[in-house]
Amino acid sequence: MKNEKAFNEQVLREKGVSLVLFFAEWCGPSSLLMPTISSISDIFKNKVKVFRVDVEKFPSLKVRQDIKSVPIVVIYKDGEEMEKLPGPFPESTYIEKLNKHLSDS
């Protein structure tokens, strides 16, 4: 994510399902989650928008989105927060959650 305006336009104002990983460079679990998020992006190509937000670069976004710890994955649908998944989970958990939100369309 290049800036907060992009977050607002691409996540909060867009229709559809988005997955956002809030992370920090210094956080080991965040680094461990990166390959999983890349895989999710490939699996759900053209179905789910996937973004990464470094909370150190965007502290006000961290506050506005009520991010208390990293890593945390937040799923949005039509700009509305649907679910927060704190900490790394197996890839299958993210797949299951995204499929649920996609099928609720």
Image (tube, grey):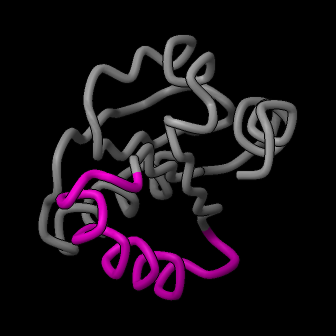
Residue 47 image position (x, y, % from top left)? 63, 70
Pick the residue in front: 62 or 18. 62
- The residue at 34%/33% (across/down) is 83
Pick the residue in front: 24 or 13. 24
Apparent side of residue 100 relative to residue 43 in the rendered image (left or right): left
Residue 89 image position (x, y, % from top left)? 14, 60
Q: Which residues are magenta?
A: 25-47
Q: Is residue 36 magenta?
A: yes
- The residue at 59%/50% (across/down) is 17
Q: Is residue 80 magenta?
A: no
Residue 32 image position (x, y, % from top left)? 22, 71
Q: Residue furthest front?
A: 26
Which quadrant holds residue 79? Answer: top right
The correct choice, above or below, for 39 with respect to 91 in the image is below
- The residue at 62%/16% (across/down) is 60
Residue 6 image position (x, y, % from top left)? 84, 42
Which quadrant holds residue 12? Answer: top right
* Secondary structure that dominates the magenta span: helix
Apparent side of residue 13 relative to residue 57 in the rendered image (left or right): right
